[in-house]
Image (cartoon, rainbow, N blue to C red):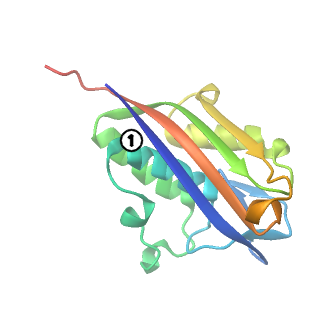
Amino acid sequence: MFRIGIGHDTHRLVKGRPLILGGVHIESESGAEGHSDADALAHAITDAVLGALGEGDIGLHFPDRDPRWKDADSLDLLARVMWLAGERGFLVVNLDATVMLERPRLRPYIDEMETKLAGVLGVDARCVNVKAKTGEGLDSVGECRAVEAQAVVLLESQRTSR
């Protein structure tokens, strides 16, 4: 059995915060604001996995009102969700994700993002695809006020049905 999940996340960009995407520190004047490390890409992927499992969303599992998750590493949160997927008998087949950010350009960081994410997802890096898009000067992304990410993940059950 296969299950598909989709995830989306948006974070406001502010000066003085680090910009972390896919577990990679990006050189930037502004970073994402949030309760955790505000890694929009990891959050979108976490939501995609949770959606495929039918297990709610990231806010249900890691509420921003809970001090345990203050400044949490979002790859650690994704790893916890991958543990849950394994407990439910599912493995990731592939991930396709898009990050929307006006600047800086993300191409120099994409390979590292894919490698880090593949490690957490338990797949070969060739099964992880991350794309970067700009907002073409439009909306909050194009005006450099936000970063957005979308992710689609395919899970496969490792349990045989009888």
Q: Is residue 18 left or right of residue 82?
A: right
Q: Is residue 128 left or right of residue 32?
A: left
Given the image, on which type of amino acid does mark 1 rest?
Ala
> Which residue sits at x=84%, y=60%?
27
Q: Is residue 101 shown above or below 3?
A: below
Q: Residue 34: horizontal and vertical position, in percent?
A: 60, 73
> Which residue sits at x=57%, y=39%?
119
Q: Residue furthest left?
A: 162
Q: Residue 65: horizontal and vertical position, in percent?
A: 44, 80
Q: Is residue 109 shown above or below 161?
A: below
Q: Is residue 68 shown above or below 47?
A: below
Q: Is residue 47 shown above or below 62?
A: above
Quadrant where the C terminus is found in the figure: top left
Residue 52 image-quadrant placement: top left
Residue 20 image-quadrant placement: bottom right
Q: Residue 84: horizontal and vertical position, in percent?
A: 34, 47
Read off the residue under disc 1: 52
